Amino acid sequence: MLSYFRGKIKYLNADFVILDVKGLGYKIFITPKTYNLLKKQKENVEAEFFTHLRLREDVQELYGFLTYPELEFFELIISVQGVGPRAGLQIMSEAPILDIKSALARGDVDFFDKVPGIGRKKAKRFVIELQDKIDLLPEKGEEGEANFDDAVSALKNLGYKENEVRQALRQVPNEIKDIGKKVKYALKILSKK
């Protein structure tokens, strides 16, 4: 299985990145959140992705994420019958993972029904199948620590050193809870150095 890649970004657009790994180019499909984080970087920046390989008779596709928990969540989403990788990326693009988990905990079919390519029938199946499979509510204190670690991992994957990443993240205001917003705020700090 091709589960991890590290290399230089040769091409980036809203749907995918082409990663040069020792002279081989791998096309890796990404979420809009990942695209927004990567587009602020210079060309030929080194990045790493945790990946899911989709193999079918006529298709070989890679789907990449900056953190391992994102990959695990994606693989859980696509375990639902009728929800393929493209729909999985769409779901993950709708909101942060904790918001998606919360919608599952509430049984909020409308939340998933509005995702392009899902529809009401799939949304119902999605909620029913995943409600029992997912750790829906983090234990007290877990969410902040997980967000911080995920933010550190995402920024390190963009080529920053861990000590400078941690310094930048400590400057992010406490009221910013969303991991994507934390990373964007920290990127502004890092780009000024």
Image (cartoon, rainbow, N blue to C red):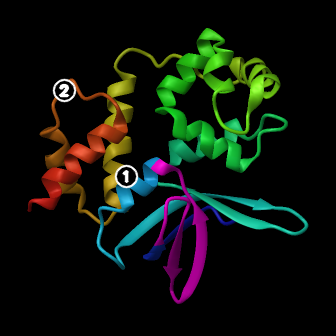
Horizontal arrangement in the rendering, residue 166 relative to residue 33 (left or right): left
The C terminus: image quadrant: bottom left
Mark 1 closeness class: few <14, some 14–19, many ≥20 residues within 10 Å: many
Q: Which residue shows up at 63% across the image and 14% down it?
A: 108
Give, as a single range, the part of the protein colored magenta.
12-32
Q: Which residue shows up at 39% across the image and 33% down it?
A: 146
- Residue furthest toward the right? 57
On the image, the x and y values in percent for residue 106 come to: 60, 10
How many angstroms separate mark 1 from mark 2 (CA)?
Answer: 19 Å
Residue for badge 1: 154
Q: Is residue 189 above or below residue 112?
A: below
Q: Nearer the viewer, residue 143 or 94?
A: 94
On the image, the x and y values in percent for residue 45 come to: 34, 74
Horizontal arrangement in the rendering, residue 124 relative to residue 187 (left or right): right
- Whether residues under marks 1 and 2 lie with C-beta atoms below 8 angstroms apart, the answer is no
Q: Is residue 26 magenta?
A: yes
Secondary-structure class at tag 2: loop
Horizontal arrangement in the rendering, residue 181 relative to residue 80 (left or right): left
Residue for badge 2: 174
Q: Is residue 20 above or below residue 47?
A: below
Q: Is residue 145 magenta?
A: no
